[in-house]
Image: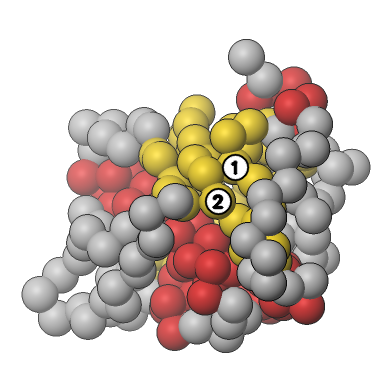
Amino acid sequence: MLLTACGGGGGDKSSDKITSTQPVPTATSASPSASATMTVNRPVITFPGDAKNVFEDQHTGDPKKDAVLADNEQMVDSIYSAIIQGNAHTSAMAFYSKGLALGSAATFVQGWVNGDASWTGTIRWFHRKVTIRNDNSAVVVYCSDESKAYPKSRKSGKIDRSASNTASYVLYNTRLEKSPDGVWQTVNLVSQRGAKACKP
């Protein structure tokens, strides 16, 4: 079972064509994001000691773009925390995703639940680029490196280290929309496993 998060139709979408110039159409940590306000009650997302997401490119110098990136982090964390919890319908997932993105995320997590699997290790998220659009939406294109993260059996605790390093790099293209309370929610997400743009 691969760690790649939900694609446009659920699961890995290795055939998707993703470029930063053609964003997809509309479809963590416990620390508060840069877009947090005193009036927003954000869910707390935690991980056990053997699993973590590490995010690069957190600060662009533009407060609005930084807020988008911060909520992108929380969206990612909400999904990978849900896998560990064994719950495809967490409040954190519904807080940071909606529409097609939330539906495919739930399907993705449920696949892990059905397989009685969790994960361990470190996933690195990098090359994160933000484009703010005029319709109160944003596009975030980014990569992940799963070469140091592995599926783990819930029942036995056995870790599967057989995943191919060639398939460990994934390119993502996401669209986000700003909610009335100021949260940048992901509304669509597609992914391309093994993307050359993400390989070292």
Say the numbered circle drawn on residue 6: none
Image height check: is 57 above or below 192?
above
| Residue at numbered disc 2 | 120
Say the numbered circle drawn on residue 149: 1
Determine the image quadrant of residue 41: bottom left
Residue type indicated by callout 1: Ala
In the image, 113 versus 90, the foreground residue is: 113
Q: Position of residue 187 (x, y in %)?
A: 58, 67
* Mark 1 residue crowding within 10 angstroms, few (<14) / some (14–19) / many (20+): many
Residue type indicated by callout 2: Thr
In the image, 156 versus 83, the foreground residue is: 156
Mark 1 vs 2, N-terminal side: 2
Q: On the rendered image, what quadrant is the N terminus found in?
A: bottom right
Q: On the rendered image, what quadrant is the C terminus found in?
A: top right
Q: For numbered disc 2, what is the local secondary structure?
A: strand
Determine the image quadrant of residue 11: bottom right
Is residue 189 shown to the viewer in this render?
A: no
Image height check: is 67 above or below 193?
below
Please tell me which residue is depicted at 59% across the width and 68% down the height of the picture: 83
Please tell me which residue is depicted at 26% across the width and 35% down the height of the picture: 59
